[in-house]
Image (cartoon, rainbow, N blue to C red):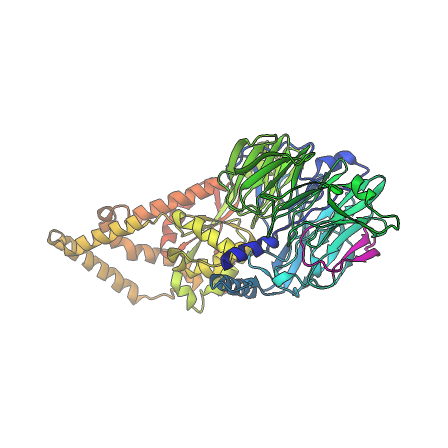
Amino acid sequence: MIKHAAAVALALVFSVTAVTPVIFADDSKYQTSWPQWRGPGVNGVSPNGDPPLHWSETQNVAFKVPIPGRGLASPIVWGDRIFLLTAVSADDNAYAASQQAAAEKLERQEWPPSVEPVKQRFVVMALARDDGRILWQRTAVERKPHESHYITSSWASASPLTDGKRLFAFFGSNGLFAYDLDGNLLWQRDLGDMETRSGFGEGASPAIHGDTLVINWDHEGDSFIVALDAKTGDERWRTERPGEVTSWSTPLIVEHDGQMQVVVPATGYSRGYSLATGEELWRASGMTVNSIPAPVHRQGVVYLGSGYRGNMVQAIDLAAASEEVNSEGASGELTLGKGIRWQHERHTPYVPSLLLDDHRLYFVKHFKNIVTGLDARSGEVLFTEKRLPGISNVYSSPVAAAGRLYFVGRDGNAVVLKSGDAFEVLAENRLDESFDASPAISGGDLFLRGHHHLYRISRNPSAVTGQAGLESKKTQVAVLGMIHSDHRTSPTWGLDQVRNTIRRFDPDVVCAEIPPSHWPSTLAIWNERAVVEDSRVKRFPEYTDALLPLMTEMGFSVEPCAAWTEEMAAERRARLDLFEKDRAQAERHAEYERRNAEVEARLAADPIDEDDPRVIHSALYDARIEESLGPYDEMLNDWIGAGGWTNINRAHYALIDRTIEKHRGKRILITFGAGHKYWFLRQLSDRDDIEMVDITPFLPPG
């Protein structure tokens, strides 16, 4: 049961929680943007949105841009800008070692498998909505976090929010920062250090109304809720929350009977506070431990939910709640029938938040693929125990627009349902990414923040300026020769030199010598535990120790481009064995041995340093490799068949060509054994649809 417990704890830190409506002078811009995690109505719905029904890596993707570092904060959209938060390690090797140690603890079933603190740059980013280019990027603070995070979480899990004038970036214990929309720092606050349960990490976002910013600080220490002046960061009030422990749910600010209330779900009591004074107005018990889902509101009723070690969704009637306040002004404790309109106690959500579309309330069971729909007015079950096809785990919260519900799974699969009283699947989609952050919808666009990239899924991607620019821009391609296991011992072309070369080249895509059949499981395990278990991939330290950690750090995508299969290897072994032992081949075999010996003697008489990366990436090296393989290629290529040298290079190149076609306009780095390099360069140099990039300026100084 330890593994199950690990998965549950992991879910805690993925709750990227919601914020609440603000009053804007430009209400139309507010309604068409996505200024906070759960959208303009803080219910997961875009009232004017109409994103695509279908998408894939090659359909309706306006852009896919890499995001540095690691973060689970969801994107927000304001006008022509997208805002994101991320944490970028200041010491890649130390962070990778800390992740590896946590992965080993998870494999040994030791609790908790958390990543120990490594100095981070806490980064705020603004990107152009049309093409995803970075407009500005600010390091809010650089420091070593005081506490760990769960292995698949991050130190940037709270989402940003904007009031249309200011951008608020909350990194929890690492600080709260207010910027104008051009990236100028207005103020910053340090509220102290949280002590989260088992060091799982933090995730709740602030809430805002007008010029008041509210932050809930539930942890294992002295819990409190605090209101700040959004203009200056000055504290307006602070209310202690005795008895409350770590939670990951964001406050919801709603209006009732002319008074603004702050609603906070929690393990002990869910409470309502006066936004003006911080005074407690009412309380209600019933939520399960580890409160995560954000509440939603409609027509005077607030809906709360939780689903760890129990099941509960409650409908709090704010009018009835106000009647429970006693004559002395003390807060009233609500019960079913007295302030709590109805309760539902099956299949409730643990991690994803509630989705309230019109009068229907939707949620998943725990963080699984099982969906329930309720009539929010009565609590009547419309449907339940309906499975989202193709999805296993769901950490991101569902969103809705144009009568459709969007559910995005951790494995890259997404399901679109029809909003209504019945469970009806409209579409199933897939992307080559893992998703924990919640989607954002604005107009005809769906924005998805994955572990490594930000996607803009668009109804009309061909009309997007950025996409047109990609189509006209030539694809940049470079080839980097690898020496596989020798990278571990080479003093000049070791793993540090490989890492630094890839960093300097800064690819969008890396074409790796990994078979496509081995990549999905490799990627899934890496994203989950930061380890490589596939025996084929483990043979290449440039991937296990350099490429995959850099993929996490830099955000580029990896395409598996090795055509080699076990069947081809078996066929080659059988044919070579026959070539050596078949008497009918004796004369031909002797000729092969003679030619091979002559080539080896010529090359040995004029040795070169085959550990020097600048030699490896020279025309001389390529010519000598081609000469050394000449007898094998000329005499055995057709004899061996699919595993012949030229034949296997053709098969590899077919996958490389597919990658180039798939990533038009991107910067692609091909990483294969150095012996393949000359053959690939010959094919690529004849193409006029790409720009060949010389790799030597990016190599270690020689």
The residue sitting at the right extreme is 328
Q: How many marks?
A: 0
Q: Which of the 4 image quadrants contains residue 656?
A: top left
The residue sitting at the left extreme is 583
Q: Which of the 4 image quadrants contains residue 142?
A: bottom right
Residue 150, horizontal then vertical, whole percent: 58, 59
Q: Is residue 216 left or right of residue 588?
A: right
Is residue 23 something one can see in this rendering?
Answer: no
Q: Nearer the viewer, residue 336 or 406?
A: 336
Q: Is residue 228 magenta?
A: yes
Q: Is residue 221 left or right of residue 348?
A: right
Is residue 438 something one can see in this rendering?
Answer: yes
Q: Nearer the viewer, residue 53 or 363?
A: 363
Q: Is residue 420 magenta?
A: no
Residue at 88%, 48% in the rendered image: 327
Q: Nearer the viewer, residue 110 or 536?
A: 110
**On screen, 118 above or below 508?**
below
Residue 447, horizontal then vertical, whole percent: 62, 41
Residue 459, horizontal then vertical, whole percent: 59, 32
Residue 409, horizontal then vertical, whole percent: 54, 44
Q: Is residue 316 left or right of residue 545?
A: right
**On screen, 174 above or below 23?**
below
- Residue numbers of the magenta segment: 223-249
Residue at 67%, 37% in the rendered image: 356
